[in-house]
Image (tube, helix red, strand yellow):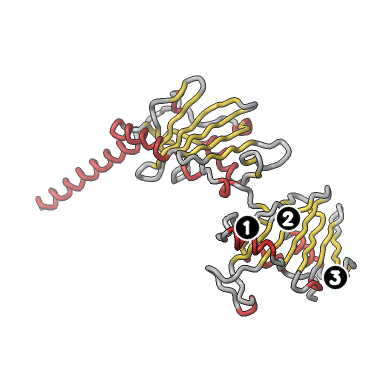
Amino acid sequence: MKSNLRILLILIIVTVFTFLLWKMQEGSTGDLSYEANADFAIADTSLVTKIFIAGTDGKSALLERSSDTRFWTLNGQFLARKDATDLLLKTFARAEVKGAVSELQRSTVIRNFSGSGKKVEIYLGEDKLEKTWYIGTATPSHTGTYMLLETPEQGKSQEPFVVHLEGFVGFLSTRFFTDETEWRYTGVFDFPGRTLAEVKMTDHNSPLKSYSIRSSVSGEISLFNASGSEVVFLDTVKVQDQFLRFRKVHFETFNNHLSQTDADSVKLSLPCFTYEVSDYDGKTSHFDVFWKSPGTGMGGPDDNNHDGEHMYGLTSDGQLVLVQRYVFDPLMVSMMSN
């Protein structure tokens, strides 16, 4: 009996010690909202006009809000992924201090900012630098992120904090990446609402399967064959569904895994399909698709030994990208088959 009590006492002591050690590593808790050096959040993210992210590896990303598009611009020349910029704004709005960094961990945390941290400048209005976040590593439990704040009024704080998002389990550093190809918008076609006016699909291997679908402003659908003659169809839902597939289409990645020589060879070859999609204002998006030889995915017997998972795509500005067949196989279906 005494032996069991002794074991229980040891377990209680170990548990309490482990808890206290964890609290020391995670940072002390308490209400820090009154401290200016702990005020990381941006109250109104609609006022954010520019975000600059710099890493210790020399890479950086400049994101700027655009007045004439739903997307932010990247490094002054590309569109940025909307999901990624939206995530940053949500992070700015919801960031909360979980606790202060313990004295035991303080020097290590500050040293890690220089070794593997990110610097994030947040601008409001006309180039007004509002706050600068220094983002370090995750806490040992991966439920918070070590961060340090700098403001024009207070200067750079000497006290790092553990920052998290209420209701979110994880760390924040992965949201602030600097690789340009990761930030670039992957949209092939983007026609929100009822702006889609015409879809033209050209099948280069079987030209007679090519077609185009047009929609009037009132929503009336018309189907045309490869020669441009209007075709009578009975299944309105089928044609309309195919037309609407083109409203929003994305490729997978800019990383096509090809050498420059092989990429140039693909670009010079005949595409298997070409898509031209237009809106009522005359904006047209052009996209070529090429078969890919088997890689990680194997084509089936009807695929002529093509990769069963991916294809190559060529954007309007000459970028060779990787696309998923899961997305593009439905777009290759001909309306002339019946």
The secondary structure type at the circle numbered 3 is loop
- Helix, strand or loop status at disc 2: loop
Where is residue 327? Give x, y as percent: 65, 63
Please report contact status of discs 2 and 3: CB closer than 8 Å, yes or no: no
**Residue at x-position 56% and y-position 30%:** 43
Nearest the viewer among 319 and 35 is 319
Where is residue 141 drawn, in percent x and y? 36, 45
Q: Position of residue 313 (x, y in %)?
A: 66, 60
Mark 1 is on which residue type?
A: Val
CA separation in Å, label 1 and label 3: 35 Å
Compare marks 2 and 3 and give the one earlier in the sequence.
3
Query: Crowding at label 2, few (<14), some or many (≥20) Cα neighbours within 10 Å?
Result: many
- Which amino acid does the dot numbered 2 rest on? Arg
Check disc 3 and give the amino acid type. Answer: Phe
In percent of the image, x 43 and y 36: which residue is there?
A: 163
Q: Is residue 126 above or below residue 9?
A: above
Residue 145 seen = no
Residue that numbered label 1 is attached to: 321
As drawn, which residue projects farthest toward the front? 261
Q: Is residue 79 left or right of residue 104?
A: right
User: What residue is rendered at 51% in x and 44% in y?
Assistant: 177
- Please name the residue that numbered disc 2 is placed on: 247
Say which quadrant the C terminus sits in. bottom right
Q: Which residue is mark 3?
A: 233
Q: Quadrant of residue 44?
A: top right
How far across and how far down the image is residue 315, in percent? 69, 55
Choose the circle earlier in sequence order: 1 or 3: 3
Q: Nearer the viewer, mark 2 or mark 3?
A: 2
User: How far apart, in angstroms, are the residues tagged by discs 1 and 2?
Assistant: 19 Å
Identify whether 337 is placed above or below 131: below
